[in-house]
Image (cartoon, helix red, strand yellow):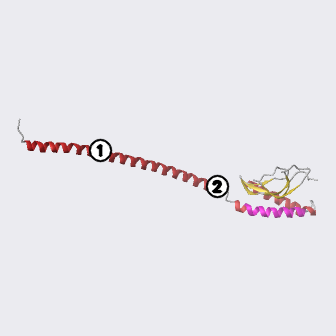
């Protein structure tokens, strides 16, 4: 066995003592860095999944909005036609007073039927209100009148026809609503 002077032994012991903690510290730093990187990786994966889900939802919403736009594209045209139909019906009522056998009246009835059929094919449906219970989702009350024959909150008469376009209300029917029997 070789004898090493005491001063060298002290230096070797100091060197070996100082190297051990530094290796442990390096391992701890490496583990902290790895766990930090893993946390970042998990966070970015989660962010990517959420972004992908948001994009899928966006695509579905755009497709649904496009489909609705196509389905209801004729809405403004039909709103304009409804006003023309009202005037046509007034003319038809005036021609009826001249006589049902009049060729003008017969022609107007045929034109009205063709127009109503065309509109029905495109999803326009008239709202029948007379005699039905008042529904604020379909009817617009313009007056209340007492009536002994019609129950309270039922429609007495319709002053302007309402229309539905497919599953949406295009125009509410203007109606006069019964307020029940007259108070004497």
Seen at 83% across and 63% down, the residue is: 88
Question: Is residue 166 covered in magenta?
Answer: no
Q: Which mark is residue 28?
A: 1
* 7, 58: nearer the viewer: 7
The quadrant the N terminus occupies is top left
> In the rendered image, which quarter is residue 123 located in?
bottom right
Q: Position of residue 114 (x, y in %)?
A: 80, 58
Q: Main secondary structure of the magenta part?
A: helix
| Labels 2, 1: front one | 1
SS for dot 1: helix
Q: Is residue 91 magenta?
A: yes
Place of residue 173 in the rendered image (x, y in percent of width and height, measured from the top left): 79, 57
Pick whichever of labels 2 and 1 is earlier in the sequence: 1
Q: Which residues are magenta?
A: 78-95
Query: Quick check: 50 left or right of 68?
Result: left
> Who is closer to the viewer here, 17 or 97?
17
* Residue that badge 2 annotates: 68
Identified at 42% across, 48% down, the residue is: 43
């Amino acid at each position: 066995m070789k004898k090493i002077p005491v001063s060298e032994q002290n230096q070797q012991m100091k060197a070996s003592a100082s190297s051990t903690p530094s290796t442990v510290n390096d391992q701890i730093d490496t583990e902290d860095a790895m766990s930090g990187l893993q946390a970042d990786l998990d966070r970015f994966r989660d962010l990517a999944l959420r972004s992908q889900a948001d994009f899928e939802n966006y695509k579905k919403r755009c497709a649904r909005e496009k489909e609705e736009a196509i389905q209801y594209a004729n809405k403004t045209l039909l709103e304009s036609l409804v006003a023309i139909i009202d005037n046509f019906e007034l003319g038809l009522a005036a021609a009826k007073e001249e006589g049902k056998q009049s060729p003008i009246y017969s022609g107007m009835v045929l034109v009205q039927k063709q127009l109503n059929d065309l509109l029905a094919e495109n999803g326009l449906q008239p709202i029948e209100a007379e005699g039905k219970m008042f529904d604020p989702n379909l009817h617009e009350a313009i007056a209340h009148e007492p009536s002994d024959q019609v129950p309270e909150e039922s429609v007495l008469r319709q002053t302007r026809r309402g229309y539905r376009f497919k599953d949406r209300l295009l125009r509410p029917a203007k109606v006069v609503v019964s307020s029940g029997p007259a108070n004497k």
